[in-house]
């Protein structure tokens, strides 16, 4: 299989999963697709190296996170991203699920309010289950910095939740 | 936030990822735009302001580069006109691929895609003629031609996942699974070898024993197998990034321990499935007791999280097994319920099960190959009456295209081949090892017709 064929096979197999990760990072479908395309476009000329990786999907996912963090650094001055709710939640307003939906919406918005690196760290830890070292590798920082990012993200979300009176906010002041 | 809150963050992220709809034709758009280097604005109707600006930023450098390239090409062409043509050198003849070894007997097959397939077989060991050693062959043209590739120094056995007769068992393999055209595994309940280069080199993974079921998808390998514990052996679920030996035990969906008699792992390109009775406990004597009703669990993120799909499964699951397809279709085989076996088919990953459907009458528990929720193959053993008693093993393959309402015979294969080694690399392209152990059946029409290709 040529490098080009391998690329096509990879995109057909993994693009949906990568799109979902990109959506968690960007909070918007258009931005997610842009991010994914940027990432693949950067990797395509060196797809042979991606193929050589122990886990090509992990390699691309790491690159997706890197692209996200660096693109936000560039865009911060002039791009405002609208943090969207996933469509699947919009029609899900049954009374018995209302509390769950409201809870998830709040947490989702709290994640969206985090700075890019903190959000990337939260997604990598809690969606991909990555270790401090793996996240550090991805964000090009030390594991101690990752712990700090996650700690600050949690503190920020805790404060936000307490202010809005949900998602465990009542427990925030428990010693 | 405490752990409880972290769990809610995990659930929220998972739920958000599952709830966002993927844009239609995303894959084709990505492939087209990246391969042809076309700006996304011409491929996708929407664009961000930033991308448009970036495109304009690149315009001048790209034009400059194009001019430089054009000048370089012109100079090269002119130079060629002023030079005598070099003597033609014969292109090197490609060295012939090693042939399939004499006496090769197929055990298991795996196709990473429509073109690239591998067959694990056995041959007489060079220095121990009474034992069988592993041998691997591969095809790059959809099964039409085959050549030998390197195989690890391992014994081989053809008793499904087990290596019952090999000594030492730690170096015996009986199954092959390839994730793509480079990364693949040779495995059994006692050993696990991995290749990262299409079979040129193999590495025996430490802690590689114990796999009764082994699937690889979503960038991770998942295995379900035994591990020693204080009370004997227990069944555990482990994952590792594909191609690595970094196995990590993960918690059992539903909690408790797994009953080895009734826990089945199945995998497809989109999800991994586990059929198990949760909350069973291990007694001091090593017995498994209790356990809730059987449930189908599904993971779409490489076994990181699991979702309980079916609240209440039908009764009569004593001989149950679970088979998954190329999409989210699965089939739960149940029985035997006299006069035979049956199945429940799901098109939504087990959330809802279709009605009970009788399977064709077989003389052994049929293995199901799920192509889609409508199209399934039932593969079973055939015993032919002979003057001295029922012998002459073979295999029958039945096909349904209406979700099990009707079945018709599409292949009657003679010989003692393993009837489990059947698979599909796409919705139309499938394979099964032939009963003579020296050839493979290939279909390109979803199992309607089959063509046999000898290995060499």
Image (cartoon, rainbow, N blue to C red):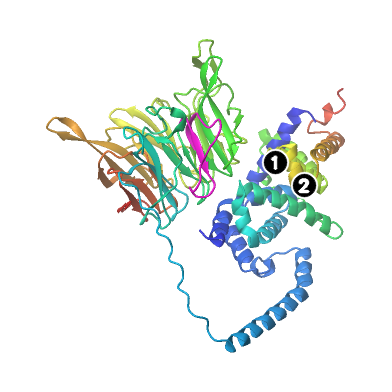
**As displayed, is residue B303 above or below residue A141?**
above
SS at badge 2: helix
Q: For residue A89, what is the image quadrant?
A: top right
Q: Is residue A56 above or below residue B310?
A: below
Residue B160, position as x, y percentages in the image: 39, 34
* Residue B206 covered by magenta stretch: yes
Residue A93 visible to the viewer: no
Identity of the residue drawn at 68% across and 36% down = B11
Q: Which residue is mark 1?
A: B13
Write the start and end of the magenta stretch as one range: B189-214
Q: Is residue B101 magenta?
A: no
Residues tagged by mark 2 and mark 1 found on one chain of the structure: no
Residue B177, position in %: x, y?
47, 42
Identify residue for label 2.
Answer: A139
- Which chain does tag 2 point to? A
Q: Is residue B375 visible?
A: yes
Q: Mark 2: give few (<14), some (14-19) or many (20+) Cα within 10 Å.
A: many
């Amino acid at each position: 299989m040529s490098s080009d064929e391998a690329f096509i096979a990879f995109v057909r197999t993994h693009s949906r999963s990568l799109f979902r990760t990109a959506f968690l990072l960007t909070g918007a479908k258009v931005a997610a697709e842009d991010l994914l395309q940027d990432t693949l476009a950067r990797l395509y000329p060196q797809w042979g190296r991606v193929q050589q990786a122990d886990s090509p999907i992990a390699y691309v996912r790491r690159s997706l996170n890197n692209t996200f963090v660096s693109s936000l650094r560039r865009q911060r001055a002039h791009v405002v991203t609208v943090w969207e709710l996933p469509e699947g939640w919009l029609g899900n307003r049954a009374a018995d699920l209302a509390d769950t939906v409201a809870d998830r919406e709040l947490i989702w918005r709290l994640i969206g309010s985090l700075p890019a690196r903190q959000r990337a760290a939260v997604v990598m830890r809690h969606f991909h289950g990555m270790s401090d070292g793996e996240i550090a590798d991805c964000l090009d920082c030390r594991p101690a910095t990752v712990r700090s990012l996650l700690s600050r993200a949690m503190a920020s979300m805790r404060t936000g939740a307490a202010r809005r009176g949900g998602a465990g906010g009542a427990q925030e002041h428990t010693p | 936030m405490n752990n409880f809150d972290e769990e809610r963050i995990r659930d929220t992220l998972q739920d958000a990822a599952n709830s966002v709809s993927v844009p239609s034709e995303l894959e084709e758009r990505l492939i087209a735009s990246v391969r042809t280097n076309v700006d996304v604005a011409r491929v996708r109707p929407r664009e961000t302001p930033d991308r448009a600006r970036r495109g304009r930023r690149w315009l001048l450098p790209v034009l400059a580069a194009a001019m430089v390239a054009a000048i370089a090409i012109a100079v090269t062409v002119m130079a060629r006109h002023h030079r005598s043509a070099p003597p033609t050198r014969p292109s090197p003849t490609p060295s012939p691929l090693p042939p399939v070894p004499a006496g090769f007997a197929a055990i298991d097959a795996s196709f990473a895609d429509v073109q690239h397939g591998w067959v694990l077989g056995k041959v007489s060991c060079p220095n121990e003629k009474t034992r069988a050693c592993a041998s691997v062959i591969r095809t790059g043209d959809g099964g039409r031609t085959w050549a030998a590739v390197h195989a690890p120094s391992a014994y081989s056995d053809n008793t499904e996942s087990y290596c019952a007769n090999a000594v030492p068992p730690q170096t015996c393999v009986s199954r092959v699974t390839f994730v793509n055209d480079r990364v693949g595994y040779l495995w059994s309940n006692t050993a696990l070898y991995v290749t990262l280069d299409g079979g040129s080199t193999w590495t025996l993974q430490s802690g590689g024993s114990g796999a009764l079921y082994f699937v690889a998808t979503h960038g991770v390998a998942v295995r379900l197998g035994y591990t020693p514990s204080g009370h004997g052996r227990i069944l555990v679920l482990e994952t590792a990034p594909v191609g690595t030996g970094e196995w990590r035990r993960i918690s059992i969906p539903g909690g408790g321990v797994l009953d080895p008699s009734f826990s089945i792992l199945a995998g497809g390109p989109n999800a991994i499935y586990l059929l198990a009775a949760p909350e069973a406990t291990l007694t001091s004597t090593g017995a498994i007791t209790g356990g809730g009703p059987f449930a189908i669990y599904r993971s779409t993120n490489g076994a990181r999280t699991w979702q309980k799909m079916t609240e209440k499964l039908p009764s009569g699951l004593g001989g149950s097994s679970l088979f998954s397809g190329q999409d989210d279709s699965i089939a739960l085989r149940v029985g035997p319920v006299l006069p035979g076996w049956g199945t429940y088919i799901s098109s939504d990953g087990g959330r809802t099960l279709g009605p009970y459907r009788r399977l064709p009458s077989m003389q052994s528990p049929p293995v199901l190959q799920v192509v889609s929720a409508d199209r399934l193959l039932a593969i079973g053993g055939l015993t032919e009456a002979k003057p001295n008693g029922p012998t002459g093993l073979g295999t029958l393959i039945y096909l349904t295209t209406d979700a099990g309402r009707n079945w018709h015979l599409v292949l009657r294969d003679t010989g003692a081949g393993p009837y489990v080694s059947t698979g599909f690399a796409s919705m139309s392209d499938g394979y099964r090892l032939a009963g003579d152990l020296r050839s493979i059946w290939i279909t390109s029409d979803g199992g309607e017709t089959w063509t046999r290709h000898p290995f060499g």
